[in-house]
Amino acid sequence: MTFNAIKQTIYGLYLTNSFGFRLRKIDDQSEIKRLRLGYSEAQLKTLNITVNIENEEKLPTEGKFLVLINHRSIIDPPITEVALKKTNIFGPWISKKELYNSFFFGLFVRNAGSILLDREKSQMSGFFSDIKAAVKRGESIFIFPEGTRNKTGKALASFKEGARIIALKNRLPILPLYIKTDANDVLSKALADKNLKQEVTLVVGDLIDYKDKTNLAISYRKAFGLSEEE
């Protein structure tokens, strides 16, 4: 690990826990959104990464959605938050138990607005109740449909069934977002060279009706012109 990578990791840990602590006693959703965005911008700024939005005209500014994002890097959530900066789209992220207990991300994840997904639990009623409550408050739900980071070398890994169920149960239109740039590669280069300026492109797809019975992975691929081989 290079000196710059060590320095960036320490600063990233500071930012994550600093914002996580500030969020600890905040209930106002607009303030949580503001702080989440502030954290995301600070993380990307220190890494010299900017976000470019393709098809920005397709991005709704209001409404409740199931927001689908592909997942290759730990910086995907900040990229998404920055891309939605000019909208009022906001809500909890679906987060795995490992993140809740993470030394690096735990404090932030627990306090910044997230819903715990514990696949080891035999009953998922609490999970779906938390989602229903968030939607009732007027919030969107953010999810990585691949379930975990894609390390296959392909554009997408296989989708889990949970995203479709969430959309149907809560009658949420699906807003597909695709981080076209390999953000994990961008992060690696940023950690290796602090002076390197990089851009990540996020593409906005057409809304998918929650009643559409087409396989969600197929609909997502179609929205961004991705073949099954990619």
Image (cartoon, helix red, strand yellow):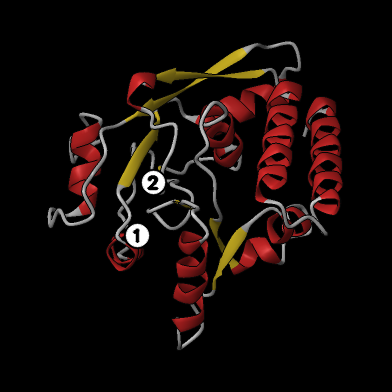
Which disc is residue 68 wearing?
2
> Splitting the image into 4 quarters, where does residue 100 fall?
bottom right
Label 1's element? helix
Q: Give the amino acid type for the residue marked by disc 1 in the picture.
A: Ala
Residue at point 72%, 44% (across, down): 31
Q: CA distance from mark 2 to mark 1?
A: 8 Å
The residue positioned 52% from the left and 71% from the top of the image is: 130
Q: Crowding at label 2, few (<14), some or many (≥20) Cα neighbours within 10 Å?
A: some
227 above or below 171?
A: above
In this rendering, position of residue 85 left or right of residue 11: left
Type of the residue with mark 2? Leu
Left or right: residue 78 compared with residue 178: right
Please report contact status of discs 2 and 1: CB closer than 8 Å, yes or no: yes
Residue located beneath label 1 in the image:
163
Q: Quadrant of the N terminus?
A: top right
Q: Image quadrant of residue 81?
A: top right
Tell me the quadrant of the picture where the C terminus can be found.
top left
Compared to residue 165, the image places residue 175 above or below, namely: above
Residue 134, image x and y in percent? 52, 62
Q: Is residue 66 left or right of residue 89?
A: left
Residue at 19% across / 44% down in the picture?
A: 219
Q: Which mark is residue 116?
A: none
Seen at 41% across and 43% down, the residue is 63
